[in-house]
Amino acid sequence: MALFVIGDTHLSLGSNKPMDVFGGGWEGYVDKLREGFRAVGPEDTVVLCGDLSWGMSLEEARADFAFLDALPGGRKLLLKGNHDYWWNTAAKMNRFFGEHGFSTLHILHNNCYDYGDYALCGTRGWFYEEKGDQKVFNRELIRLEASLKAAGERKKLCFLHYPPLYQGYTCPEILALLEEYGVEACYYGHLHGGSHRLAVEGRYGPVSYHLAAADYLQFRPQKIME
């Protein structure tokens, strides 16, 4: 049993917004994802760090969920990204997944999941471009803390969509929560293309940070631990 992470799959199998138009590494990205997931075993856990589907509703994203569900991995934990317009209440999403037999898909939102001695925590996070909406920002801080509190005294890994820091930018409130609750490592997505060079890879204070955007990982889920 192993733990993997990848974000920003940007699927559009049921809509018309393929990422291939951006060229470069995105050409043939669906096939690359399918090939990259061959490293994942049937009992493994994969955390998906948001921006998973361009679908505007659960129904429009159904083909993308079917694709993700069919990929190797016994458990896939889904975070919300800024482009996940299909996102709904946890009850509605879980019911939708159940009705369509998507048995490997689970929502990471105001909760946490066990992985051996670790708790897997997370939420969408925050980005400076949205700093003007204090209410949304405060809500994300509450969700992150709720997830971290749910972990209790277990060792913690945190997964976000937005980077809590990169070169020239930090979100002090999120960094403070990660440090307060003893998070060992934080994995995030959102940064693409030329923005990869801004990513913080490695330790910043007591926490280790890692970019997990799909194009950064060349569409191969990154193994975190066995």
Image (cartoon, helix red, strand yellow):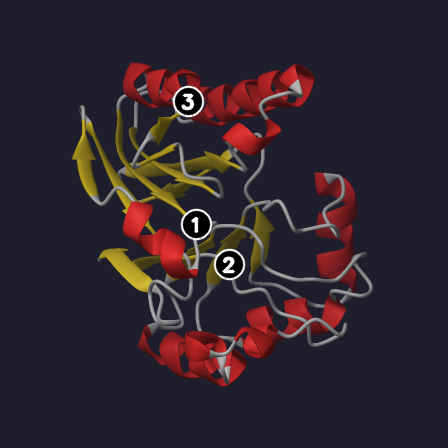
Q: Which secondary structure lies at badge 1?
A: loop
Reply above or below: 134 against 101: above
Task: Specify the amino acid type for callout 1.
Answer: Gly
Q: Which secondary structure lies at badge 3?
A: helix
Q: Which mark is residue 8?
A: 2
Residue at the location (28% across, 19% down)? 179
Neighbours of disc 1 within 10 Å: few (<14), some (14-19), many (20+): many
Q: Which secondary structure lies at badge 2?
A: loop
Q: Which residue is mark 3?
A: 174
Image side of residue 45 versus residue 2, left or right: right
Residue 204, quarter of the rendered image = top left
Which of the two labelled residues, at mark 2 and mark 1, occupies the earlier sequence position?
A: 2
Q: Which residue is mark 1?
A: 189
Q: For the N terminus, give its image quadrant.
A: bottom left
**Mark 2–mark 1 CB contact (< 8 Å):** yes
* In the foreground, 209 or 94: 209
Reply above or below: 16 against 154: below
Which of the two labelled residues, at mark 3 and mark 1, occupies the earlier sequence position?
A: 3
Residue at the location (34% across, 54% down)? 196
Q: For the C terminus, give its image quadrant.
A: bottom left
Expressed as whole percent of the image width and height from the top left, the position of residue 73 reads 44, 68
Image side of residue 22 versus residue 149, left or right: right
